């Protein structure tokens, strides 16, 4: 670190990398020391925006610079593992965009490498830094929702149809990371079904099911072939239910004081067996801090304060385990796949 600033190099300046570069450049505690990409047009843009930053197409230059504290990998997913591993082995704190790798074994290896070299490893699970998700977590952890029964996420659109990855890998990482984060639990078994309508072997729509260690269940519906533009996460608790709707600007979170309790003892009539509760609907105020700014600030803070990132290597591994196992399940007609099989 120089002059108390964390020196950061961003590799990958395609669609998303420039957003990370902009945020690290603006953070008072960070210095955007390098911008790296293989594409000359992307490098030219970076030169124009950041005149004092070293702009290069040679990743090894970042690895070899002893004064560089951290590397941010925002390249395409298949390159994450190799570039991330090199960064960790060069002793750099490393931020890798989601998903951290394509296979659980590679994610585990990155986690082990970070431990071996004593550096921070963080993954860009952006929604874990969303103030609305923080509110949901607070409601769950405080016990306000009561026992959580299940949670589900919808990420739907008539949108960009990808050829190199299916809807699960394209949309799933964010929702899976939030479901894991909110439940605070380890996924133990998943299943997934999906359909390929537009291209062979690339699922346009995927329905996924996650079973957690505690018995809590998560469900995922992702699609780029849908009439709705929906980005919603719903958590159903015993006492209350909460919905995060990211398409809403002012009512991102709605808390429903609704629930049902049952008696397991002998009962004569239906009314004695189940009690439904319909109470108020509450819309808490949510801070409007930009999640990406909070996420990049968190990475810098964890480096400075020697703390473990919220979206650390273990968190990254748990998301890849779900994706990896769902991919197997998709290929095998929806077979339940245990994460221990990976
Ligand atoms: N957090 C979010 O909300 C969010 C949103 C979009 C994308 N992403 C993630 O960001 C990552 C990048 O996605 P994208 O859409 O920007 O991809 P992209 O294909 O637009 O950009 C990738 C860039 O990486 C560069 N690159 C590849 N290999 C390189 C190497 N060895 N050295 C230097 N540069 C290299 C390419 O030239 C390209 O410019 C992915 O992991 C994606 O999942 C995250």
Image (tube, rainbow, N blue to C red):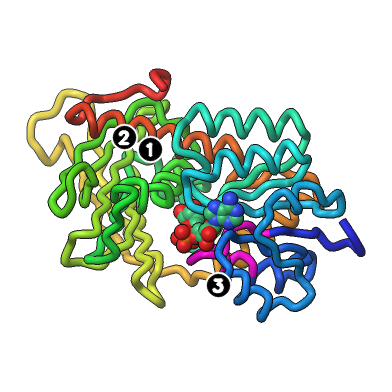
Give, as a single range, the part of the protein colored magenta.
10-21
- Left or right, 156 with respect to 306, comes to left
Give the distance between the C-alpha atoms of the residues marked 3 and 1, in whole angstroms: 33 Å
The reply to whether the magenta stretch includes residue 109 is no
Q: Please name the residue that numbered disc 1 is placed on.
A: 323
Position of residue 323 relative to residue 244, above or below, is: above
**x, y percent for residue 140:** 46, 47
Please provide percent x and percent y for residue 122. 63, 46
Question: Callout 3: helix, strand or loop?
Answer: helix
Residue extending farthest to the left is 269
Q: Is residue 133 visible?
A: no
**Of helix, strand and loop, which one carries label 2?**
helix
If you read the primary sequence from the N terminus, does the residue marked by circle 3 or circle 2 appear first?
A: 3
Horizontal relation, residue 136 to residue 268: left or right: right
> Which mark identifies residue 116?
none
Asked if the residue under mark 2 is in contact with the one under mark 1, i.e. CB atoms within 8 Å, the reply is yes
Residue named by callout 3: 41
Can residue 51 be spotted in the picture? yes
The mark lying in front, picked from 3 and 2, is 3
Q: What residue is disc 2 on? A: 327
In-front residue for pair 204/178 = 204
Which residue does the image show at 35% across and 28% down from the upper left?
Answer: 215
Looking at the figure, which quarter contains the N terminus? bottom right
């Amino acid at each position: 670190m120089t002059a108390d600033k964390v020196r950061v190099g961003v590799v990958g300046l395609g669609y998303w990398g420039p957003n990370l570069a902009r945020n690290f450049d603006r953070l008072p505690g960070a210095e955007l020391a390098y911008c790296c990409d293989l594409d000359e047009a992307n490098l030219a843009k970076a030169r124009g925006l950041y005149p004092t930053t070293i702009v290069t197409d040679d990743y090894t230059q970042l690895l070899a610079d002893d004064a560089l504290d951290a590397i941010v990998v925002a390249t395409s997913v298949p390159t994450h593992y190799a570039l991330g591993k090199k960064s960790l082995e060069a002793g750099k704190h490393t931020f890798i965009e989601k998903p951290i790798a394509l296979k659980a074994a590679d994610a585990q290896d990155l986690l082990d490498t970070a431990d071996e070299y004593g550096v921070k490893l963080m993954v860009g699970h952006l929604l874990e830094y969303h103030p609305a998700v923080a509110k949901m977590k607070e409601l769950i952890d405080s016990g306000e929702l009561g026992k959580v029964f299940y949670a589900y996420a919808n990420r739907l659109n008539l949108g960009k149809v990808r050829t190199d990855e299916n809807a699960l890998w394209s949309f799933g990482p964010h929702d899976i990371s939030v479901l894991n984060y909110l439940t605070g639990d380890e996924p133990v078994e998943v299943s997934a079904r999906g359909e390929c309508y537009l291209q062979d072997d690339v699922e346009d729509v995927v329905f996924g099911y996650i079973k957690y260690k505690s018995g809590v269940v998560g469900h995922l519906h992702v699609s780029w072939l849908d009439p709705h533009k929906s980005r919603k996460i719903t958590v159903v608790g015993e006492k209350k239910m909460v919905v995060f709707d990211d398409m809403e600007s002012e009512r991102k979170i709605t808390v429903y004081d609704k629930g049902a309790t049952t008696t397991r003892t002998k009962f004569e009539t239906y009314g004695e067996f189940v009690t439904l509760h319909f109470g108020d609907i509450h819309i808490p105020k949510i801070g409007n801090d930009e999640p990406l700014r909070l996420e990049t600030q968190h990475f810098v803070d964890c480096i400075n304060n020697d703390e473990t990132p919220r979206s650390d290597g273990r968190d990254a591994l748990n998301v890849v385990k779900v994706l990896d196992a769902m991919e197997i399940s998709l290929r095998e007609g929806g077979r339940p796949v245990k994460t221990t099989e990976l």
